[in-house]
Amino acid sequence: MQHDHKAEDYKAGSISLGGAVAMGTGVMIGAGIFALTGQVAQLAGPLFPLAFIIGAIVTSLSAYSYIKMSNAWPSSGGIAMILQKCYGPGGIAAAAALLMALSMVIAESLVARTFATYVLRPFEITSGPLVPILAVAVILFAFVVNIAGNRSVGLFSLIMAAIKIGGIALFGIAALWSSGFQFSASDGVQTFTAMGFVASVAFAILAFKGFTTITNSGGEVTDPHKNVGRAIMISIALCVVVYLLVAFGVGSSLTIEQIIAARDYSLAEAAAPALGQLGFYLTVVLAAVATASGVLASVFAVSRMLAMLTNMKMIPHSHFGMSGPIQRHTLVYTVVIASVLAVFFDLGRIASLGAFFYLVMDMLVHWGVLRYRRKDIGASSWILIAALLADAIVLIAFTSMKLQSDPAIVLIAAVTFLIVFVFERFYTGKWLAVNETHEH
């Protein structure tokens, strides 16, 4: 039976401005705060709140390319559409789009593992088989809700976004208040380098990259030529406020050594001295809600992206005997890959892989817009160059830090890049298809 994917999966105007903001913040706040605060602090030391501010500035520069392209061509193809408009339907566009999809699947497993570490925190369990088992369970839960359809995802995301933004902001304010606005993280031994600080911005950028989820739903947002850009900037602004409240809240309760020791569950750890045992349990519940909804929004976004890449002939597709529309198959792929990652990699390594993939893809987007589409969309070359340079500086610092601390993850990332680019080069049959007609 043949399905009309366009009519079935993509409804123009089905996502309001508020819904788009909820979706963006839903993905961002799930990963950004619970999983990455400790990872950022480990590299940046007491300056970790500043790393989030710089991450937001770099992300805002990055968002320029996506907003200008989405304003010109709003599409549910999102980033895949942007890449194809720049490079044509060749290997570079396909490989970069696949890197984006992979970084989204990585984000999903990152948030799923974070869910597991927080839920197990009251039982003093920090490792062992229960962490990956719970991570896979929450990914499967997200799969079931996504099968239920678009409407349930939109409504659920809105409710969850409201709960977690309110709850996390309250946590930050209460922790700061109870400490008398002292910043404990500045005490202790200082052994942090400028290179480490720049590298920490890679994780901070990862905490904001959820804005791309909005780009990927461009065709469904109401009045997309205006609202896609608005939703992106509102989401980033909301996240800056929430992240800074949390960073200062955690930093007021714990020394930098304590934050690093508890890096996978630093919010729960910070809640205990600030807000007592009840605050600790409330933070665990909040983390569970935030991360579960983050996985939910992420599974939805990735399956959509993979379905779009399949429809655009940028990746091969096999039904493996499954019935139903392509998006249902891509949901299954997404869940399987994320589950495998959640089982075999710890939080730090998952986050590192995500940072590598996202930064390289982001640079390819900026270069493509600068080189091929700048005049068509009236973009400023200075902003595009600034975005490219910012990404490059962060990527170089991050790679050199990881080569010292965990060379294996750099090797895994490099091999994956090689496989993705070589595979797409052969699959599409050409690197670039710029200025070729897109109608075959």
Image (cartoon, rainbow, N blue to C red):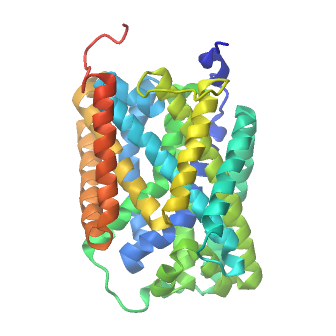
Q: Nearer the viewer, residue 161 or 328?
A: 328
Give above or below for 172 relative to 326: below
Residue at image position (39%, 29%) is 82
- The residue lying furthest to the front in this view is 321
Q: Quadrant of the C terminus?
A: top left
Residue at image position (34%, 50%) is 359
Picture coordinates of residue 333 (x, y %)? 56, 39
Let me know if residue 297 appears in the view.
yes
Picture coordinates of residue 58 (x, y %)? 36, 53
> Number of callouts in the render?
0
Picture coordinates of residue 90 (x, y %)? 30, 24
Does residue 349 appear to the left or right of 181 in the view shown? left
Give above or below for 276 relative to 49: below
Q: Quadrant of the N terminus?
A: top right
Does residue 272 appear to the left or right of 217 in the view shown? right
Image quarter of residue 328 = top right
- The residue lying furthest to the top in this view is 440
Picture coordinates of residue 37 (x, y %)? 50, 69
Q: Nearer the viewer, residue 368 or 356?
A: 356
Does residue 205 appear to the left or right of 318 in the view shown? left
Let me know if residue 221 appears in the view.
no
Give above or below for 416 relative to 424: below
Residue at image position (45%, 67%) is 348
